[in-house]
Each structure stands twice: as C-alpha cells, then as structure tokens.
Image (cartoon, rainbow, N blue to C red):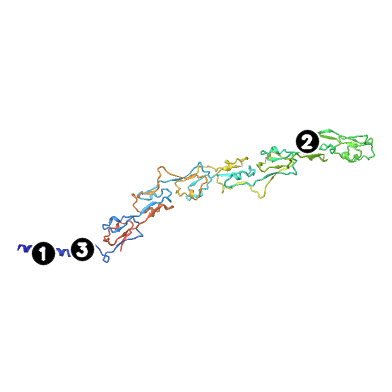
Amino acid sequence: MEDQSRREFLKRSAWLAAGVAVASVPFLGSCRKKESGIYASYYVNPDDCIGCGECLPSCYYSALLLPVPTLYSISQETCVECGRCVPVCPEGALAVAPVSVEIDKNTCVECGKCVTSCPETAIHVSVIQFLITQSECVECGKCVPVCPEQAIHVTPVFYRINNADCLECGKCMPACPESAINISMINYIFDYNSCVGCGDCRTVCVNEGNCISYDVANYSVTTSLCGGGCGHVCVGACTEGAITTPSGYAIINQSLCIKCGKCYEVCPKNAIHTAKVVQNANNCVHCGKCYVACTHSAIDKEFPTGYAPPIIDEALCTRCGECMTNFQCEYDAIYKEIPTPHIDPYIDSAVCSRCGECIDLFDCPQDAIHKDVPPNPFDPYIDQDACTRCRDCMTTFTCPESSIAVHLPIGHFAPFVDQEKCVKCGECITKVACPDKHAIIQDLHKAEIDKRLCMKCGKCEPECPYDAIDHG
C-alpha cells in the first residue's frame, strides 16, 4: 500500500513537471522575439553612427558589432601647430605644443612684401623706401648694376668735348677728379715774317702765361727809302690817320698807330717797318688764345708726337660734372649730352627688395641714394593673436633674407591625439576644430547589429548619444 502510494506520487509529480515544462515553452519563447513577430528589429543608422562605441556595454548578448572604434589622429604633414583645436575637445585629448611664426628684426630689410601674403593681416612692417635724390644724382648709371633686382633706372648722360671749339689748352684736365679728360697739349710757333706786331696775341697772353713781349715796340719809317713817287699810299691805307707826309716822306704818329700792318702791306718800297713781338716758350701755358687772336696767320700749331684729339674717357668718367661746374670753359667746348629717350633717375619701389646693396655695396659720390624711413617707425613683427600659423608668409612668399621663421617652444613635441582621453565624440570634426588645414583625421568605423544575436530588448537605443540606433 505504501509502495503503491509512493509510485502514484512520483507518477503525478512527473506529469506535473511535464505540464509545467510544456506550459513554460511559450513563455521562454517570448524572450526571443522572432523576425516575424510583433516586435520590430533594431538597426544602426549609418548616417548617424560615428563609431564611438558608447552603445557596446549596453548589449548583454554581444549583438552590437564594432570591431574597431573610430580613430582620431593629427596629420603631421598638414598640422601647422597653431593649437587652436585644443580647446574644442571636451576631454582635452588634443595635444599640441603651439609654435609661433616670427620675424627676425636683425635680418629683415623692412621691404613689406610679406605683408600681403598673410590672409589674416597679422604681419606689420614699417616699410622703408630707397630713393634717388634727382637734384643730387649726376646720372652716371654706375649704381644700376649694383642692384640685384634691377630696380634702379638711370639714363646715363655723357660729357663730351666739342673739338671745333676746344683750344686744347688742357685747363679742364685738373678739374676732373678721375683724370678722364685726355688732351695732347700743343705748342705755338711764331712766324715772325708774317707778324705785323699788332700785339693782339700779347694782350690775350697777359693773363695767361704772359710769355709774349715786344722786341720792337713801334712802327718806323726808313726815310732814305721813302721819298715819294708812290703817291703815299700808306696814308690812304691807315684808317686811324696816324701817317702824315709833311716833309715828303711818311711820319707815323705812335699815339694814333694801332699797329694793324696795313701801311706795311701797301708800301711798295718796304720803307715801313713793323713792331715785333717775341715769345718766351718756357712760360707758355698752351692756352691757344694767341693763335685765335692772331689775324695774320703768324702763329702756327706744333703737334706733339702721338697726338690725339681731345676726348673724355667714358670708362673713367663718373659724370660728376665737375668739368663744367668746377671749371668753366671759356669757349664752352665741354658739353653734357643727354640721350633720347631720357628718364629722370628713380628706384622702382615695386621691384626693390630693400636689400640696401645700392648703399652698402656702392658708395655714391654724390650721396644721391638714400634710405627713406617713414614717420614713427617700429620693428617688424607678427601679431601672434591674429596669426593662424598657416605659414603662407613662408610658402606663398619667400623672404629673400629668410627673416621669417617658425619658432618652437621649450619642450616642443609633435602634435597627437591622446587615445586614452579621446572618447570618440567626433566634436573635433563636427565643430571643425581645424578649419584651415583639416589636419585632424577621422578613421571612421560604424557599428552594426547582429540580428541573430539581438534579443530586441531595446537597451542599446537610449545609450547612443547620437540617436543612431532605431527600430522599425
């Protein structure tokens, strides 16, 4: 009886367990919502997902798949290390040691050409100018080849000697500081047979070498030769009325005689004797005035060996003009030749690099080139608050003096993203932390949901900060 009751109890317990098991099957099945069931599937919207991985811990069933979260890094090639991205990251994961772009005031020539290269107008230069003072410039043109930029424009003038007017006295030669005037001074020889003793040569020589004097001071008449019969033609030839014949032969009034020689020329009996001059050749200064003054061709030129016409050596001439300013040629034989076309000398500011070589490497004798410094000058600098470190002042513009350079701070390091601090929020991208160079790189990965593992519990949906998980 007891055994039967025990068997009956076990039998009923087995049926009860089976019933419970059967009854429990729909309940257990309800935990795995079928695709065709009443519960919608969950999915990740790829347009919204940034691969941050914040949703991963919320899924107990490992249905959210993101093998590699999105990785953020800084491009070493494009980053200019301005540091402006640093405050954008809420986690402080962006690590940059900001550099500065500066101007070396010791080498900067203050040309100002770098100013326009800066898109932020951060470069400030008190621009200087190199100018030519036209009133001082003698237009020699010797400064032109000194300028490496060919910014100096001068039309060289020339100083010439007009040989037709030059007496070859050589007085201009000492006036030239460069010994550029070459004159072969000639000697003057007196033909006493042709000389009538007028004294014109002596008059012009008094203030020169004073080398001409009278050997015979007055005209005279040999009375034994003058006896009339000639009609006294000498009386009619004398324009001054200095000859009379009161006794039948000619008498010359020395106070009226001008020693012109006309009476001598017409006397058929050679009874009239002219005055005579004599030259002291040792005192002659070769001025040539006697040659010009003599109207009787009694003075001849004697050319030295190797004679050459007077000339100004253009290779030596500095166009200083002292041959005209410090010396005044009485016959205006030296003149300034201005070429055509001619321009006033100037320095092209658009081309000039302000290197200063026109002053440093060339010493203008007239000091016609000068450095023009503007009022209230200041040392060149770059406004660090305005500078974005774009380096356009170094890439789109190349400073000839290499005065613009990047300065690294103490403890400088290459920019990077601290992966331990980075939460993959993507704000460095969405908030455009690097607007100019786009140096922050986003290696984007997106999460997916394995529908075979997803239990459709929905716990992942509120965990996504970007509303990238949805169902439907």
Task: Report the residue marked by disc 1.
Answer: 11
For residue 95, above or below residue 456? above
- Label 1 CA crowd tier, 10 Å (few <14, some 14–19, many 20+): few
Q: Amino acid at mark 1?
A: Lys
Alpha-carbon span between mark 1 and mark 3: 25 Å
Q: Which comes sooner in the sequence, label 2 or label 3?
A: 3
Alpha-carbon span between mark 2 and mark 1: 170 Å
Task: Report the residue marked by disc 2.
Answer: 205
Name the image quarter holding the N terminus. Answer: bottom left
Q: Amino acid at mark 2?
A: Cys
Query: For the point 84% across and 35% down, which residue is it?
Result: 276
Q: Estimate the x, y position of residue 452 in percent, counting from the top left.
A: 28, 62
Q: Are marks 1 and 3 in contact (CB under 8 Å)?
A: no
Task: Report the residue marked by disc 3.
Answer: 27
> Which SS class for mark 1?
helix
Q: Are marks 2 and 3 in contact (CB under 8 Å)?
A: no
Q: Is residue 299 visible?
A: yes
Alpha-carbon span between mark 2 and mark 3: 148 Å
For residue 88, above or below residue 194? below
User: Which of the pair 11/44 is nearer the observer?
Assistant: 11
User: Which of the pair 447/472 is nearer the observer?
Assistant: 447
